[in-house]
Amino acid sequence: MATQKITIEPVTRIEGHAKVTIHMKEDGTVDHAYLHVNEFRGFEKFCEGRMVFEMPNITPRICGICPVSHHLAAAKAGDEVYGAPPPRPARLLRELMHMGQVIQSHGMHFFELAGPDLLLGFDADPAIRNVVGLIQANPDLALKAVNLRKYGQEIIHILGGRRIHPVFAVPGGVNKALMPEERDLILSGYHKALDTVKVGIQIMKGWAEANQEDINKFAVFPSGYLGMVKPGNTLELYDGDIRLIDSDGKQMELFDGRTYLDYIAEHVEDWSYLKFPYYKKMGFPQGVYRVGPLGRLNASDRMATPMADAELKTFKAINSGKPVENTLYYHYARLIEALYAVENVAVLLDDPDVLSTDLLNTRHDYKGEGVGVIEAPRGTLWHHYFANENGQLERVNLIVATGNNNWAMSKAVDSVAKTYINGQVIREGLLNRVEAAVRAYDPCLSCSTHAVGQMPIVIEMVDSQGSLTRTISRGAD
Amino acid sequence: MGVSGMKILLFGYGNIDRQDDGVAWHILRGVAEHYQVMLPTVPEETNCVLSPAITTTFALQLTPESAEWVAEFDEVIFIDAHTGSVADLLHVEELNANFQTSPFTHHLTPQSCLALAGSLYEKAPKARLISVRGYEFGFAQSLSEQTEELARQAARVIIASIDQAGD
């Protein structure tokens, strides 16, 4: 059967971050839809020749949205290269900075990116279906949301200094102690942050109750799930083993993240520059998995803080203890993690070691190779360094969180397109849903450059002969 | 505070590791030099006070909390790079608050930043964008020759603009 093709493409400075193409059949139904990612992998090459100890300062420049994740993953890889495990107080402070990152990132996503979809509706006019529309609809909530993100940023700034990029974690530890007044300052914002996250959870639950039909047909599909855990399968974001479960919730692997090459391989498709990681033993596509909040909560049995743990039980009940497959529940999972991160800030600050000045392990046992793994807000992030005897990098391998979800994002786009497109008329609300399918994963697609101007969506319909038959654009100048 | 009492923010953003994408930092350095302030080769601190009236900020990209900072000034000059999609080599544009959605990314435009400043903090600083054409976006900290020359021109335009505001 002849097909036509619809393309949804944000226009960017450098060849586009990603685009969606929807291949239509003649009868107006969807044949297949893809998310194509043009991600720049050149950063790994850029790092070659640099010193390992420089990496915590260089790699945050990959991304302006989650620089802390790269900063800490690089420091952890450096710990391994130099054979210098950090003292416990340094681990606590690194984890505290990481909680700040999770709070600000998850807070921004729920309230400022996903919130307009949920609170104003997928069918709302794009002119108002954005954070400004949300502010006008609920100014008090909007200010709380901004303050939640600021709270996370403040934690990062207190530890890393008010600098362009944090200069905090170094191989073997950290280079700054936490002062008692800084601890008290962070604690003074704790209750407000907690209240805002709780408000978010109530909003999410109310929305889910009112939109069950959409949730249950919107990109619901089985996959594996991968996330970091502590003993007892307790969710962990900074340091632990990697747990991989199948679509029924059965554990397939529990492994030291440093041995990821024994378990994870990457598949290449000719329609995307971003590789597709998968579980080696099952092959591709059988071994695909999801990471990030939904992946982590599905891969965990409990959480280490009481309020988040109680909320996890509610989350687990959605599918009677089996993995939750609904893409839109990424938003709920993200808020539960934000709740955990805020609670964990208080736990970390209550630890007597958090004010210690025993911050750096200067006794090295040089290995020359190291893997740093961390749960970035969007999912599991690997930094793998190979250095010569002088500590100069010869090879770098990065598996970024968004890459781990590459298959899932494309699958979600395909699923939503097939569910909602039927006929030649493409409604605005449909495009919103396609966007929302990608946005649920909160991808970070090569944020290391930006553009003057905006990123409009351009949809091109191409018939089976390759002729452009229709162009729909939104948000263009 | 300047003669006119205006508080002016020069807000540059970009990635200095991606050649011309980071031209805003080079432009800020040029402006700072005029005020006898030496900024480092690569950005370290986020903010720098050039005079009682003039503050510089540099960031990898605009973020929602940028709006709170922007709201504290009477005038904001955003400084960026652009590609061939903008006709002028040195582009100057008056900006109005206008939120623009970025479907798949965390990209925030200066117009969106102004919209957030207005909606959240009820502030509407006068704003303009000064951008110069970028040609090379590889992984390096050096500017292309053409953009380096445009950066010098942009710094002069900004200095003249500040002097005019102070008259």
Image: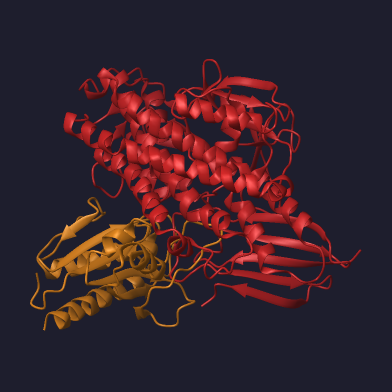
Chain colours: A red, B orange
Q: Residue at x 57, y 42 (%)?
A: A205
Question: Residue A201 location, x and y as percent?
Answer: 51, 41
Q: Specify the quadrant of the image occupied by residue A250.
A: top right
Q: Can residue A171 be seen?
A: no
What is the count of numbered marks? 0
Q: Answer left or right for A275 relative to B61.
A: right
- Quadrant containing the N terminus of chain A in the rendered view: bottom right
* Residue at x-position 55% and y-position 45%: A204
Tell me residue A366's x, y (percent). Answer: 36, 21
As drawn, is B48 to the left or to the right of A119?
A: left
- The residue lying at 72 percent from left, 49 percent from top is A213
Residue B108 percent across, percent down from the top left? 43, 62
Using the image, determine if residue A85 lies above or below residue A142. Answer: above
Residue A212, above or below B32: above
Q: Is residue B16 above or below residue A281?
A: below
Identity of the residue drawn at 37% across and 20% down: A83
Measured from the top left, where is residue B103 in percent x and y?
56, 61
In the foreground, A389 or B139: B139
Q: Vertically, is A254 above or below A208?
A: above
Front in this rendered view, residue B56 or B3: B3
> Is residue A119 in sight in this rendering?
yes
Residue A391: name its quadrant: top left
